[in-house]
Amino acid sequence: MVDFAPLPSRYPAGEREAQLIVVDLTEQFLGAYEQGLLRFAIPIVSGEPENETPVGEFRITAAHRAHQSSLYSIEGTDVPYPMQYALRFYVNAEGVSYWMHGRDLPGYPASHGCIGLADEQMQLQYYGVPAQPRLDDAKRLYAWVVETLTDLGTVLPLSNGPRVVIRGSAPKRSGTGRAIP
């Protein structure tokens, strides 16, 4: 299998940074860079049209392996939506936090503004599918960010977390839910 990454293998603006995360909303992909070199790229799901993901430059300010939403629940239940392997990158003026975290990837923008990363183990736990989880992109990015820090399972403040560049605009959806090119 050949890895696909619609992101550049070099990101010159990040050559002086140990870690840099670039999110391309147009491509619905995230790239993890070290000294400007792409280490890995993973697909994402960004905010739906009425809840767009913010664009600009941010910094990862907190990490939480077992985070849960304080605003949203699993559809049809009172169970807080699981946001495992969460990395906070933005807090808006109203105090609402935006995270990169594990979820399903439906193939189109579908979040409330967060950046969703594949977490099939969480999907199996809460939704019963897939039978054999393989994709763990949220866990991979989380481990890359917190690599040498002690994770005690609580919210871990990061005073100098990686810079995050979010660019582009999310594709619009047709009435069928598919992205319109």
Image (cartoon, grey):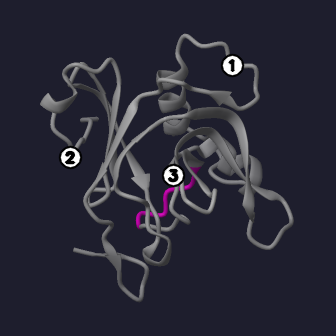
The answer for how far apart the CA atoms under marks 3 and 2 are is 17 Å
The answer for how far apart the CA atoms under marks 3 and 1 are is 21 Å
110 to 46, vertically: above or below: below
What residue lies at 62% left-to-right and 50% top-to-bottom? 130
Indicate the amino acid at tag 2.
Pro
Q: Position of residue 81 (x, y in %)?
A: 73, 57
On the image, which quarter does residue 77 sit in? bottom right
State the residue position of label 2.
6
| The N terminus lies in quadrant | top left
State the residue position of label 1.
151
Q: Which residues are magenta?
A: 103-108
Residue 113 appearing in the image: yes
Q: Indicate which disc residue 116 carries.
A: 3
Residue 11 appearing in the image: no
Mark toward the start of the polypeptide (2 vs 1): 2
21 to 114, vertically: above or below: above
Point out the frontmost of discs 2 and 1: 1
108 to 6, vertically: above or below: below
104 to 18, vertically: above or below: below
Nearest the camera: 131 or 178?
A: 178
Q: Indicate which disc residue 167 carries.
A: none
